[in-house]
Amino acid sequence: MPPALIAIDWGTSAARAYWLDAKGRILSSRSAPLGVQKVAPGGFPDALRVLLGEAVHEDAPMLACGMIGSRQGWIEVPYRECPTGAPAIASALAQVPGAPLWIVPGLICRDPRGVPDVMRGEETQILGATEVGEALSRTIVLPGTHSKWAVVGEAGIESFATFLTGELYGVLKDHSILGRLAARGDDAASFDRGVRRSLEADASLAHDLFSVRTLALTGELAPGAVGDYLSGLLLGAELAAGRRWLQRQRVPGDSVHLIGDTALCERYRRAFACAAIETTVGPADAAARGLWWIAREAGIAG
């Protein structure tokens, strides 16, 4: 039986395709390291064929989300303004010329100073982790290279904020003096120590980051604990800033719903526990679920 929809989560570094039946259930999935940064201009049709492999169904509609709709992707799909929900997102799908492939738009919002913030792909995960028309949580956090905090309510995705926590960690650990004394290791206590330091009232990230080096130099931080302590400082700083952002949104910050990679969600769950914030974790297939709901709203599937 052919699938009712081929749902594709196509990001910066990788792409994953899901074959869904007429009820939105996953029949199978397949991934490949074919993110938009790894595909040459004009190479997306070939990349799609490689991603789908032999399981190509000419008659099955395809819907993709993520960076595939960015300026560096197959075609650029304009952002939708927040607040917005599944119906508005579905109405703004863009079809790739000559192909049965539609692409989901990203979202844009602005802070009180008018500075824009954007997302591509996370909006679909958020929709997939919520009941249609009803949020599972007022606050959703999506850990990642660019972590997203989103407020979801009756109007759908109302606002969001991005934190470059993951990218900062990679840059500082691999390309700064802070990682010189680091060694492979796993130290949960040092991670907690970093989180709690960044949550203190007198925390100053630009100053506290240097303690990664000084604590290691004086032997007060073992080489195998350096990475976890650095990670804790950065996640704690994100958490503190996220709470302030929620306060400005007049949203309670006592619980959050996590969506994303299992190991990364567990790290965030531990950081939130240091601040006595309750967490729940969303489904691992949130992107596929979101693509299914959008496809149904758009009349592509279902």
Image (spheres, rainbow, N blue to C red):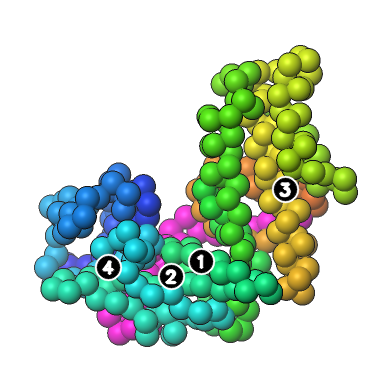
| Earlier residue among tags 2 and 1 | 2
| Earlier residue among tags 4 and 2 | 4
Secondary element at image label 1: strand
Secondary element at image label 3: helix
- Badge 3: how crowded within 10 Å, few (<14), some, or many (20+)? many
Q: Amino acid at mark 3?
A: Ala
Viewer-proximal residue, 250 or 28?
250
* Residue 215 position (above or below residue 9): above
Alpha-carbon distance for marks 2 and 1? 7 Å
Alpha-carbon distance for marks 3 and 1? 21 Å
Residue 165: image x %, image y %?
60, 47
Judging by the rendered image, the residue that carries numbered circle 1 is: 118
Magenta stretch in the rendered image: 277-302
Alpha-carbon distance for marks 4 and 2? 12 Å
Q: Are marks 2 and 1 in contact (CB under 8 Å)?
A: yes
| Earlier residue among tags 4 and 1 | 4
Q: Amino acid at mark 1?
A: Val
Judging by the rendered image, the residue that carries numbered circle 4 is: 75
Q: Residue at x 65, y 37 (%)?
A: 231
Instruction: Give the left or right position of residue 70, taking residue 108 as reference.
Output: left
Q: Residue at x 53, y 29 (%)?
A: 174
Instruction: Give the left or right position of residue 45, taking residue 144 as reference.
Output: left
Alpha-carbon distance for marks 4 and 1? 17 Å
Judging by the rendered image, the residue that carries numbered circle 3 is: 237
Q: Residue at x 80, y 52 (%)?
A: 276
Answer yes or no: is residue 186 visible: no
* Residue 237 position (above or below residue 151): above
- Badge 1: how crowded within 10 Å, few (<14), some, or many (20+)? some
Instruction: Give the left or right position of residue 75, taking residue 165 as reference.
Output: left
The circle on residue 103 is none
Judging by the rendered image, the residue that carries numbered circle 2 is: 106
| Earlier residue among tags 3 and 2 | 2
